[in-house]
Image (cartoon, rainbow, N blue to C red):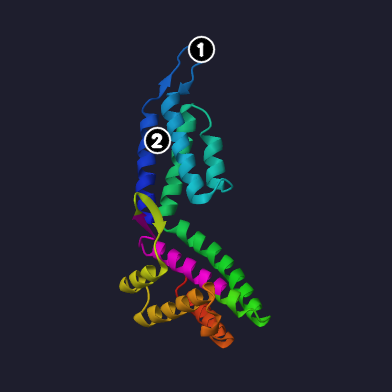
Amino acid sequence: MNTTDLVRRADELLAMGKSVLATGYSTGGQYNANYVKSAPMAGFRSAVLSFLERCFGKDHPHYEQFKQQAAKNYRSNAEDGLAIFQAVRDEIAGGWLFKIKGLVAAELFADFISMAEHLLETGYKDPAAVVTGSVLEEHLRQLSLKNSLPVEDDRDGDPVPRKTDRLNAELAKAEAYSKLDQKLVTAWLDLRNNAAHGKYETYTSDQVNQMIQGVIEFMARKAL
C-alpha cells in the first residue's frame, strides 16, 4: 500500500471520528457528563488501532497514545483520539512513514550485506550470492512502494508478490533509475537465481564480490 492509499484510508477514519463526535450528548443533572455513543466510538477505536498496528506496530507511541486516550466513551476521549489521529494522518501525508521504514530497512540491509561479505571471505560464495540477491530483491520492492508502483499481482482473487524482473522493468520505465541500472540489476538477479538453483559453476567468487560491491553502490545511490 502506497502513501496515497494510506492517506485515503486515514481520511476515511477521520470522517468516522467526526461522525462519532456528532453523536455527543450530556447526561444533565447534578453530575453532568459529556459522552459520545458507545457503539460508534467502539468502531472508530477498533478501526484506528488496526490501521496504526499495520502502519507502525503495537509498540509505537502513536498506537499506545491513541489506545490510552481513546479508551472510554467520554466526548474528551473522542476529541483526543481524533486529534492524535489527525497528527498521524499528516505525518503519513508528509512521507515520514516511508522515510522511517527506509532507515530501518537500510540498517537491516547493511547487516545482511555484511553477512554476505563474511560468507564470501570464508569461501562460501554461493550463499553469499543468495543473501545479496535477497537484499536486492527487497530493496526493489521498497523502491517500488516509494514510487507508488504495485508490488503484488492478483491470482485467482489472491494477492501474490510481483516477480522481481517485472519490478525491475517497471522501475526503469518509471525512471526511478536508468536503463543501465536495469541491466545491472538483471545480471545480479540472474547470478542470484543460478546460486539458488545449484548452478554453482556458472559464476566465480570474483563475480559474487563484484555483485556485492555493485549492489552496495546501487542501494546507496537509490536510497529509500
Q: Is residue 130 something that shows in the picture?
A: yes
Where does the N terminus fall, quadrant-wise?
Answer: bottom left
Residue 23 x, y percent position in the rendering: 38, 25
Nearer to us in this view, 119 or 48: 119
Relative to 195, is 18 on the left or the right?
left
For badge 1, the amino acid type reads: Gln
Outermost residue on the top side: it is 29
Residue at image location 49% in from the left, 26% down from the top: 74
> Extreme right residue here?
122
Q: Quick one: label 2 or label 1, which is nearer the N terminus?
A: 2
Is residue 199 one of those drawn in magenta?
no
Which residue appears at 46% of the width and 23% of the height? 34
- Residue drawn at x 48%, y 66% as measured from the top left: 138
Amino acid under label 2?
Answer: Gly
Q: Is residue 84 positioned above or below 144 on the image?
A: above
Within 10 angstroms of label 1, few (less than 14), some, or many (20 or more) residues?
few
Please state the horizontal and vertical placement of residue 120, each as a whole percent of the image: 63, 80
Q: Residue furthest left?
A: 173
Mark closer to the observer (2, 1): 2
Which span is picked out in magenta? 130-154
The image quadrant that residue 65 belongs to is top right
Q: Magenta stretch containing residue 153, yes or no?
A: yes
Q: Is residue 28 above or below residue 128?
A: above
Predominant SS along the magenta part: helix
**Secondary structure state at the residue bearing disc 2:** helix
In this orientation, which residue lies closer to the viewer: 144 or 21?
144
Q: Is residue 131 above or below residue 72?
A: below
Question: What residue is shown with label 1?
Answer: 30
**Residues at marks 2 and 1, CA–CA distance in whole angstroms:** 29 Å
Residue that mark 2 sits on: 17
